[in-house]
Image: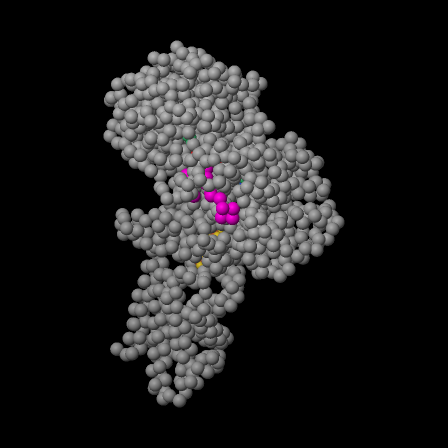
Amino acid sequence: MSQDIFVLIEHLRGQVADISYIMLAAARTLASSSGGQVAAVLLGKDAQKLAGNLAADKVLYADSPALTEFTSEAYQLTLAKLIEEQSPRAVLFGHTTIGADVAGWLSGKLSLPLVSSCVNFTSDGKFLSQTCGGKIMAEGDLPSPTILVTMIPGGYKSEQGQAAQASAIESFTPPALDNLRVALKKYIEPEAGDVDISKSPFLIAVGRGIQNKDNLDLPNELAAAINGTVCASRPVVDQGWLPTSRLVGKSGKRVKPKIYLALGISGAPEHVEGINESDVIVAVNTDANAPIFNVAKYGTTLDLLDLVPQLTEKVKQAKGG
Amino acid sequence: MKIAVPIKFVPDLVEELNIDSSGAALDTSWLRLIINEFDDHAIEQAILLKERGGAEVTIICAEGDGVDDILFNAAAKGADQLVKLMGSDAAMMNSHATARVLADFFKEIQPDLILTGVQAHNDLDGSVGALLAEYLGMPYVGYVAGVTAASGSVIARKEYPGGIIGEMEVKLPAVLGIQAAEQPPRYVAYSKINQVSKTVKIEERAISDLDSSGGATVGRMFKPEPAQRAEIIEGSPEEVADRMVGIFKELGVM
Amino acid sequence: MSYDTIKSIIVALALLVALGIFVRYAWQRLWVYLRRGQTSPKFSDWGERIKGLIVFVGAQWRLFRFRLPGIAHFFIFWGFLLLSLTILQAIAEGLMAFANPQFVLPVIGTWGPLAFVQDFFALFVVIAIGYGLYLRLIVNPERYKGSHRNQGVKVLTFILTIMLSLLVMNGLRINLNEDLLGRYRPISTLIGGLFVGLPEATQSIIEELCYWIHLGVVMLFLTELPQGKHFHIVTSIPNVLLRNLEPRGRLPVTKTSDGAAGVSKMEDFRWRTMLDLYTCTECGRCQDVCPAYNSSGLLSPKLLVMNLRRNLQERGAALSAKQTNGVLSKSLTGEIVGEEALWNCTTCYACDQECPLFIEHINPIVEMRRYLVLEGKMDKMLQDALANLGRYGNSLGQSDRMRAKWTQGLQPAVKDARREPVEYLWFVGDYASYSPTLTDVTRKTAEVFSKAGLNFGILFDAERNSGNDVRRAGEEGLFEMLMGKNMQALGKCKYETIVTTDPHTYNTLKNEYAWDGNRPRILHYTELLDQLVASGQLKFSKKLAAKVTYHDPCYLGRYNGVYDAPRRLLRAAGCEVVEMPRHGDRAFCCGAGGGRIWMEEKPGHARPAEIRIREAAALTGVQSFVVACPKDVTMFKDAVKTTGNESRLQVQDLIEFVQEAI
Ligand SMILES: Cc1cc2nc3c(=O)[nH]c(=O)nc-3n(C[C@H](O)[C@H](O)[C@H](O)COP(=O)(O)OP(=O)(O)OC[C@H]3O[C@@H](n4cnc5c(N)ncnc54)[C@H](O)[C@@H]3O)c2cc1C
Ligand code: SF4
Ligand code: SF4
């Protein structure tokens, strides 16, 4: 048994995901109240280089061909062995396509309690999670001895999880990873060749509130006037109204523009996690209770169809005169 | 192939949510419950698999308001068996308890493939799918948008951030967490549901004790405080547009 | 054998063959094929039906909505009736030639005044046919697009030939002193004059030739008649006689034995609908007025009928021949009639109203939509709207508990009709209750009601979408569910009159809800306010000096005949009402009806609402475009923007004028 906080480092094709750094930052808070160390858990094949800038006290590293790329089963088995052997105080996972596949399974396997969708740890060591699409917050204790937590961005900055120096790597041996039932066949790339929304300082995001494809003319005109870029929430992309390359959020891109103008977006956690590092969020949503107003600095409850043409007009005027 | 789709009900976010007097749970007197949207996708995916290659589809849900309608709706889409678990309220079980109850049932009916919604917006202790897989000793892959059947296995299209898809081969029996079916859930006409409700039976099964251990214990629930909320600009579209342009200028983006 | 005997034999044979062909086709089409259709409800109210026959067939009433073509057809129709007697005479003459080459039928061949009228009508028909040919060959208006032009021209030429040969024949007989009634035929006499110089023998030969041409073309025509659009000459009579006498706003529904509605193949239609198909003259009047045709062009009610007719004939033939594939495997909704076409109808009733022969378009369109809905083949947006309607009772997907949120802060507070008896139960409707752009208007309506001293209340969260457009989108089961919930809520309230904001709601409440003979008084708010002004209960203190134009909502005007009340109200408030070219029962639809408001618009076409706004913008001095339907506000406000008329025209609800004038 230890008071250490483990963080599962997520990486995809040689790239460490932002959420890993955010969790390292979170783990630091927890570790200071538990009095343990922060350990980054890295699984891979010849992946030590990825440990370079992890702000951890140590890196626990397992190397195996079966861990080259993420597959749920190999990760589950490896982590089960590690946690059982070391019983840390807490293990943090991203509430993501990687972390969520593993955390639930481990909770069952090791009979350890699990808390999901955590944004923040309070100074007295409690979890703070979002629930009901961000409309409600839940707070509770982290039971001993070991707790598993899946985390969503919002509470910590990823810079805090990055370090200039590499920490010491301790290798551990994964269990026998053969006869696996889950195998990665290949990756399929999204269609390329579109603009990179993460580079634009002014993003105009459209959500389901846009209602139909025709109405996309409105944000497009505004974007042209103000030299911004149009992006979207998932329903808009799922309808095929905009390409996947414009998707913002959990399954799309994380963006950090100067202004994020959210038009008809409710502010579901999966969307918000992609935008909460924007400088200023301005939300247009007819529902005064929409969670997007919790992250926005400015907002209006006007109908976007009424507002946007006016806004385009005013922008043109301001630029012209 | 035998496909099972366990579904659950969640609070409808269209309604205003309130906290009850204990301060640690939702006020259920005003809750409206609807099917978890990802479960709806799981049903659609199961039906698509059935249409493409044949399958026997079973839908399972704990009892509750409106559950029969959703089960009949699924039957009208093409589900073969409907099962209602009696003895607990659909929306009030945590994922651990749900997964344990389901595991008992699945050990009996032995499905080849279990499809669940990848998550529900009120899961505070992880999703049912991953837990269920472990209790049944099956592999689990979540965040799946599209499934193709192969012999003895399935190919699941797992989503990664940025639109990357990982094609996973998963040996059966297995559990998949569905994020989106290959097509949006289809609409079923009312008359079809009515018709089905007259001919199809819902099998009722009693569940014994619930074991919720392993779930998070919530000490307090609250709505995000107003102080954290945006400053609302009031006025006509013209006035609001003016003000916004002012803000854009201040921030130097114009 | 003498020439006259041969003549008799040939005429008899020709008649036999032509009649044989006619009867065979007619029997096949009207008996064999129609019998495959579903049963139609019993027909009653024969007095009304016969009256209709006189007005709409006899007097050709509806045809005059297109003035000149109407007059032309009137003369062709009556000329045809009158001159069919001369044809009889010609046939009789031929048949009897072997016994008496000069045979005349009693009365028909002997009564001078008849001969006189016929003589003139023959001329009128020639002129009318000339106009018809001019229309088809030279003007070729848009409404004929897609019609069988050659068939039309062929038949016009037939009739022209029949008439000319008759006139020449009669003229020559007068010259040859063979016509007992010669002095009753001034036109024929004139034409005969052209031949006077020829030797008698030549005249005789030409006369005999004309007889053969006359009779020959008549026989040809007889064989042609049941094969194309001219079958309407036969079927228009039963078609008008057996027309739908139900209120326009009551949509028929055919249910199969398992309780589902919807038509997936020709034989699922009622035989009565099939008769409609045979009756279409391809005149294109319906197409001319159709907003769908005039905007996206994806739907033409005329082509719909023509395509269905072709399928009816081809399927009929294939089924009779016991085929199993070919045309039988073609899908009705998809291959015969495009799905897109079906979804484009706004159910505006312009076509049904325009058709001179009472052919119904909306009914088969909705029947086919019902099938598409059963199959889940529809627009994603429509799916979402229907799902929302099922779950929350409104298409916007908002909580039913928030339905009366707009009443918050109103003084005096709006009464809850479920708690206390009221005189007027106000059925507010979805858009007026939820749409942020409309609740302001709704509040004004409440204010006007209060100021008029009405004892009124609403159903609060028990109100559901009335289902008018749900039904027309083809979701019959959901309509029934919504109607059931509303009836249940209404059943618990005490009230005398229902007032509605929305004409669509008005229509279904009035014409479709199952009141079982206890229907309360149902008024649109414009009717109610008009009555209050008339009785002096509502007084205007201001005279607004606005120049406005009023748009008739389809479900208020065409469907329910409310045209004057809104105009009187506007005038009472001091407005000058300028009419658009298309107003009253010719008003052009906004494009929202029949569930269209829930469907995606295909880009790249002018939308009906835009066409309408341009029409209004062309009126000089009109500043306001006044509407009396919440859906109109939504549609036209948008159209004013997209057509760039924001500075010219303002879209306003009628209630805003009333409120201002009080
Ligand atoms: C694993 C997973 C990953 C996901 N990844 C993503 C992701 O990457 N990105 C993402 O966006 N979502 C993602 N989602 C989906 C997410 O949960 C939400 O469903 C989605 O973000 C909702 O999109 P929305 O806000 O556009 O639509 P809605 O939630 O339907 O909101 C529409 C909003 O528009 C408002 N509105 C309506 N009409 C108007 C009007 N005329 N004017 C102004 N406002 C109006 C309404 O009040 C409403 O608040 C993910 C979900 C899961 C489970
Ligand atoms: S009802 Fe209106 S839209 Fe539909 S076919 Fe007739 S004219 Fe066209
Ligand atoms: S349906 Fe009626 S209006 Fe339309 S083309 Fe045929 S006859 Fe003319």
Q: Residue furthest front?
A: A165
Q: Magenta segment: does it hold A238?
A: yes
Which residue shows up at 63% across the image and 58% down it? C622
Which residue shows up at 60% across the image and 51% down it? C651
x and y percentages locating residue B196 in the rendered image: 40, 32
Question: Which quadrant of the picture is home to ligand 3?
Answer: bottom left
Q: Is residue B4 left or right of residue B194?
A: left
Residue C287 in the image: above or below residue A158: below
Instruction: Tell me if I can see residue B77 in this picture.
Output: no
Residue C15 location, quadrant: bottom left
Q: What colour scheme has been applied to the protein in the rendered image?
A: one colour
Q: Magenta segment: does it hold C618?
A: no
Quadrant (top left, top right, bottom left, bottom right) of the N terminus of chain A: top left
Nearer the observer, C493 or C77: C493
Residue C450 location, quadrant: top right
Nearer the observer, C36 or A155: A155
Number of numbered discs? 0
Q: Is residue B3 left or right of residue C662?
A: left
x and y percentages locating residue A238 in the rendered image: 41, 39
Which residue shows up at 49% across the image and 32% down it? A277
Residue C189 location, quadrant: bottom left
Q: Which residues are magenta?
A: A224-241
x and y percentages locating residue B127 in the rendered image: 41, 23
Instruction: Tell me if I can see residue C452 in this picture.
Output: yes
x and y percentages locating residue B187 in the rendered image: 42, 37
Which residue shows up at 26% across the image and 31% down it? B150
